[in-house]
Image (spheres, grey):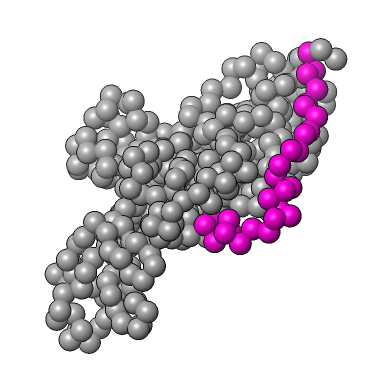
């Protein structure tokens, strides 16, 4: 299945709240990430009496036959610690400068290099798990399990000044995370010559955790902004928001934990679904005037663009050094043509019809 048509919507979900205006780590509301769709290690969840969940569950309905197949892609962000440091004087004597130990640098909260301000903070790496294609009719009553692991990793990035001399280092370290995706297929009934399947997909965080109730450490081992992209061949998804009348009771019985499945793609198609930790409607769209990510998906692009333009040079320097996402956003905003700015202003669109009043 070609997922490209829905990945733009999915990326909004992936980075919703990742960094909020004014897009600087020093801003109070960016001191801690907004964590939509976070799935924490089981032991941490138990220490919180389940208030921070260790699982996410999607249930949806599919109308199909013996040829119906399901594609599943799970996506999430994994946070990593980013430590900024000044290199010790004897680092230049090392023969292997591609590796670095804690003893090679002095950790600092921020470091100015040229026109950028680099800060100790957090970043994120995108993770994806593609499940093998599943033929629904052959898996009725079975549970398919797929484990996944992303191993601990540490990478240095050396910061160079205008003379190309090493002026500091950024050390990024991500922890090992482990999890499992469970998929269960049930046949509910026959419907107008078709089979009606209930699909249950659960994501569980099975990462070992020995840090008690330390939320910051748990967050480094969590799956964040977790969502699923589902595709059906030779069948159709049933809308859970506006199901056919004869399926309304069955649709209402679907139990979704921490996620909201909606139809995506061209209006009227029923072969793709996005199960999102953010409440959406069927067939969500991104305004064509929006030229890039602002991480504030519910905000207005024009307003955020104007706000970025009002930042001082010092604030922009910090924004450039925050991470690659904010740097690109700043560069895009500063080079935006007037014509593009005008396209964002004064657009009026018709609202969707209310089917109850038709």
Up-down: is 140 above or below 321?
Answer: above
In which quadrant of the rendered image does the C terminus lie? Answer: top right
Relative image position of residue 256 (x, y in whole percent): 53, 26
Quarter-of-image position of residue 164: bottom left
Q: Residue at x 32, y 74 (%)?
A: 158
Q: Residue at x 80, y 29 (%)?
A: 350
Lateral position of residue 279 relative to residue 248, left or right: left
- Residue 154: in magenta span: no
- Residue 345: in magenta span: yes
Lateral position of residue 288 relative to residue 324, left or right: right
Relative image position of residue 203 (x, y in whole percent): 46, 39
Up-down: is 151 above or below 38?
Answer: below
> Which residue occupies the foreground of this view, 256 or 66?
256
Q: Is residue 300 visible?
A: yes
Relative image position of residue 352 (x, y in whole percent): 78, 26
Lateral position of residue 97 relative to residue 278, left or right: left
> Which residue occupies the foreground of this view, 82 or 136?
82
Q: Residue at x 21, y 60 (%)?
A: 108
Q: Residue at x 58, y 22 (%)?
A: 254
Lateral position of residue 12 relative to residue 105, left or right: right
Q: Which residues are magenta?
A: 329-356
Quarter-of-image position of residue 29: top left
> Which residue occupies the foreground of this view, 86 or 1?
86
Relative image position of residue 340 (x, y in whole percent): 71, 53
Up-down: is 176 above or below 284?
Answer: below
Circle count: 0
Q: Is residue 228 visible?
A: no
């Amino acid at each position: 299945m070609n997922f490209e048509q829905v990945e733009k919507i999915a990326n909004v979900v992936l980075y919703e709240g990742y960094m909020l205006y004014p897009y600087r780590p020093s801003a109070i509301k960016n001191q801690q990430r907004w964590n939509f769709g976070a799935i924490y290690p089981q032991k941490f969840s138990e220490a919180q009496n389940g208030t921070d969940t260790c699982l996410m569950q999607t249930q949806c309905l599919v109308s199909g036959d013996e040829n119906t197949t399901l594609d599943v892609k799970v996506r999430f962000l994994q946070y990593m610690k980013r430590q900024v440091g000044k290199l010790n004087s004897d680092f230049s004597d090392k023969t292997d400068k591609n590796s670095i130990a804690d003893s090679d640098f002095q950790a600092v909260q921020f470091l100015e290099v040229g026109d950028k301000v680099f800060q100790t903070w957090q970043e994120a790496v995108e993770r994806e798990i593609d499940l093998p294609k599943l033929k629904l009719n052959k898996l009725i009553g079975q549970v398919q399990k797929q484990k996944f692991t992303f191993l601990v990793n540490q990478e240095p990035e050396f910061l160079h000044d205008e003379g190309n001399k090493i002026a500091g280092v950024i050390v990024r370290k991500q922890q090992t995370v482990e999890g499992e995706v469970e998929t269960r297929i049930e046949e509910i009934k026959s419907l107008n010559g078709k089979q009606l399947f209930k699909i249950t997909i659960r994501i569980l965080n099975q990462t070992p955790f020995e840090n008690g109730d330390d939320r910051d450490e748990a967050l480094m081992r969590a799956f964040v902004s977790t969502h699923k992209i589902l595709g059906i061949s030779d069948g159709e998804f049933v809308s859970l928001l506006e199901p056919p009348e004869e399926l309304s009771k069955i649709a209402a019985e679907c139990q979704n934990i921490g996620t909201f499945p909606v139809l995506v793609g061209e209006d009227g198609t029923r072969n793709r679904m996005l199960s999102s930790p953010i409440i959406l409607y069927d067939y969500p769209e991104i305004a064509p005037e929006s030229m890039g990510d602002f991480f504030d998906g519910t905000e207005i692009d024009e307003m955020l663009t104007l706000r970025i333009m009002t930042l001082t040079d010092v604030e922009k320097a910090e924004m450039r050094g925050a991470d690659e996402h904010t740097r690109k956003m700043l560069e895009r905003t500063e080079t935006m043509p007037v014509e593009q700015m005008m396209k964002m202003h004064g657009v009026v669109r018709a609202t969707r019809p209310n089917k109850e009043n038709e």
